[in-house]
Structures are given as structure tokens and as C-alpha cells.
Amino acid sequence: MKKKIALVVQRYGLEVNGGSEYSCRLFAEQLKKKYDVDILTTKAIDYVTWDNHYSSDVEEINGVTVRRFGTDESRNIKSFNKQSEFVYYNGDKTVYDELEWMRLQGPVSFSLLRYINLNREEYEAFIFFTYTYFTTYFGLQLVPEKSILIPTAHDEPPIYLSIYTSLFHLPRYLFYLTVEEMEFVQNKFENQYIPSGVLGIGIDSHNFNSLLPLDKLFDTYNISSAYIVYVGRIDESKGCKEMFEYFIKYKKEKKSELKLVLVGKAVMDIPNHEDIINLGFVSDSEKFSIMKNAEVLVMPSKYESLSMVVLEAFYLNRPILVNAHSEVLKGHCIRSNGGLYYEAYDEFVQCLNLLLNRDFQSKLGHNGHEYVEREYIWETVMKKLNTAIENIGAS
């Protein structure tokens, strides 16, 4: 009989496209090969409101059992933003103010917490994804001796709240997605004594077996010239507003047919510009085909804990152009020699012009592919995680 483990995450589903949620699904589908895996999550699909969306309490997704628990309250985003402003920047805040922030952050699900508490002996280990949310903060405190935390942390205001200090000293194991994340967390919390390491995430080569031919891709999406691509949530917090401004200014200054293609859900207004093409959600085969035929993948976010899209672009031999203020993205460029990074508009233009040179583009793309093959294959990643699970079970 397989040992039973639980993965705890705020949202889960094929239609959920958040970075940590997607990572959780990938890990779950790898872990099911060796373990009996349960996902413990909420019925929410929208991270803004946390309203209950799914009706089923239990379902199976790609061979993994998903146990869903209702959220107890919707998030009032205005109240949350007001409380965030207070606890981030007010020196007179108390721990109670921070706990109120955690309630407003959500997703609040006491039925999920009760399930963890009542069924703690049923599972060999609990793997918690993302430090930020209610489900991780309170859930991990119920089973610290059986817990593995994958915090997906970076330098952002919430991590400086005092309530997180104890959280980062509780897990039995801590795994990070990048070198930069591990260095940041260990410097911040001085928790080097906890067994930990850089886990990363695996890339599955089978995902890239059904790419669309170039002519079909261009016919389907009416793309008739060279393009750069952004893949992910189209959001001001992801640096998209600056990316649009830079691209539009670049087009005004340069005589070029270059397009900017967007793939993902828009939660901000997209400029009405003839050379900005918004495709919305597409299938994985379409997404990878669009990435494969792009000149460059642009990732303008200042805050990234890993960026699966960057690794996918590397695997597809595509170079990247990233925001230098993101230590993680900059680190990918430096360790792989597969991309360039910019701090301001002039650097953005210089880097983009270099990357549009096909010989240079090809060399960096090759370097990125080799980097992923070396560091981000599932066999290497899962060996680390399986060892931690077995050690917890033996203790």
C-alpha cells in the first residue's frame, strides 16, 4: 500500500493559473507515481474574492484526489488593501492587526483546518504551498512535525510582518524554488538549521510534443510578422503597465513590424494598439507553439519566485528579457547565460535589439535549454522531495 500524503494549497484546478497553484499540481501529478496523494484546498477559483465556485467536495483531477472545503467569507478587497497599507507601513501596528490582515487575506476555511487536525495521523506528510495565505499559515501550525513548506517567497511587504517569523521556523523541511529565494529567506529568518535546499521544479518534455506548425499558428492568430511574447496574468503588479509603455515608445522610435503578443488572463486595461495582440487563454500546445516561434519571451515582473514560463521558454530554445529588479529572473539569466535584463527603458531597447539578432538569439536560446536540462528535470527534483517525505515518515 502506498503511503498517503497531503498537499495543501489555496486553489486547485486545471483552470487555475496562479504560479504556486500550478506548481502544486505539477508536483502532485509526479508524487502520485509513488504515493497516495490528496489535495486539500478550497472551493474558490477567484483569488480576489475567494467566493465558493466548485460544488463538489471531492473530485479526481489527472489521477489525483482533490478534497475541497468551503470558504467562510468573501474577501472585501477594499478592506484588505486598507489593512495592508496599515500593517505594511505603520510602526504602531500590533500582532492583532497583522492577524486581522491574515483574515482579510484569506482564503478563510475553518473546515479545511478541522480536516487537517482530525486526519493528521492519516498522512505521512503535509506539503504546504506558498507562505502568504491563511491555509498555509494556520494549517502548518497544526502539523509542524509532519510539514514541508515550499514558501515561494520573495522580497515583498508581507514577508516583513512579524507573524511570519515563527512560521519560517516551524516546518520539518523547507524547500525553495531558486538559490535567490533560499538566500533571502535564510538571511531574513536565520533558519538555516532547518533541513532545506533548492528544489526547483521539473520540466516535462512530453508537454512539447504537439506543437503547431508555424503556418497554422499564424493563420489561427493572424500574426504575420516577428513578435515578442508575454505569457502570464496581465496585471499591473506583474510589470505589464511598464511593459506596454516601453513597447509603445519603442514602436514610435523604431521602424519595425515587431508585435507584442499576450497570452493569459487580463486583469487590467490593455492599450488599444495595432501591434499589441491579446490572445487570452489558449491550450498548452498553442501556448508552447506561440512561445517557440517568438523572438523573445519578455518577463517584466519585479517579483517572481521561480517563473515556470521562463523555464518553458528556455526548454523551447527561446531567450528571455527580464526585469533586473527581480533577483530570481536576473539569476536565471546569469546562471544560464540565456537571457538579458534591464532596469530602465534605454536598457530595454538595447537588450531587445541585441536579442532580435538571430545568431545571438540562437546562442542564448541554446544556453537556456542546456540550463533546464541540467537543473530542472523531474528525476533530480523528485529525488530531493521523496527523500524528505521518507525521512518524515521514519521519524
Image (spheres, rainbow, N blue to C red):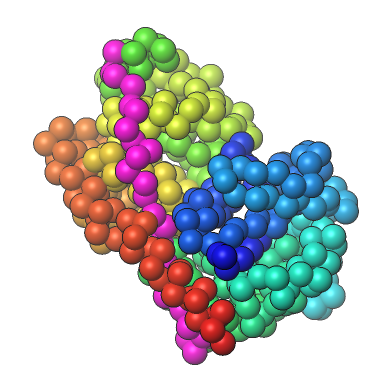
Q: Quadrant of the C terminus?
A: bottom right
Q: Is residue 81 rendered to the left or right of residue 204? A: right
Instruction: Report x, y in % for residue 299.
Output: 41, 44
| Residue at the (65%, 55%) spot, across then down | 39
Residue placed most toward the observer, 58 or 298: 58
Q: Magenta stretch: residue 205 in it?
A: yes
The span picked out in magenta is 191-215
**Which quadrant: the N terminus?**
bottom right
Please tell me how many numbered marks the rendered image carries. Answer: 0
**For residue 123, which quarter of the picture?**
bottom right
The residue sitting at 60% across, 49% down in the picture is 64
Q: Is residue 228 visible?
A: no
User: Relative to 77, is 151 above or below?
Assistant: below
Can you name the residue that lies furthest to the left here? 359
Residue 283 seen from this side: yes
Q: Which residue extends farthest right?
A: 72
Task: From the top left corner, tell me how far across and down residue 6 is, in percent.
Answer: 64, 63
Of 53 and 366, the residue lying toward us = 53
Residue at image point 32% right, 51% down: 341
In the foreground, 228 or 63:
63
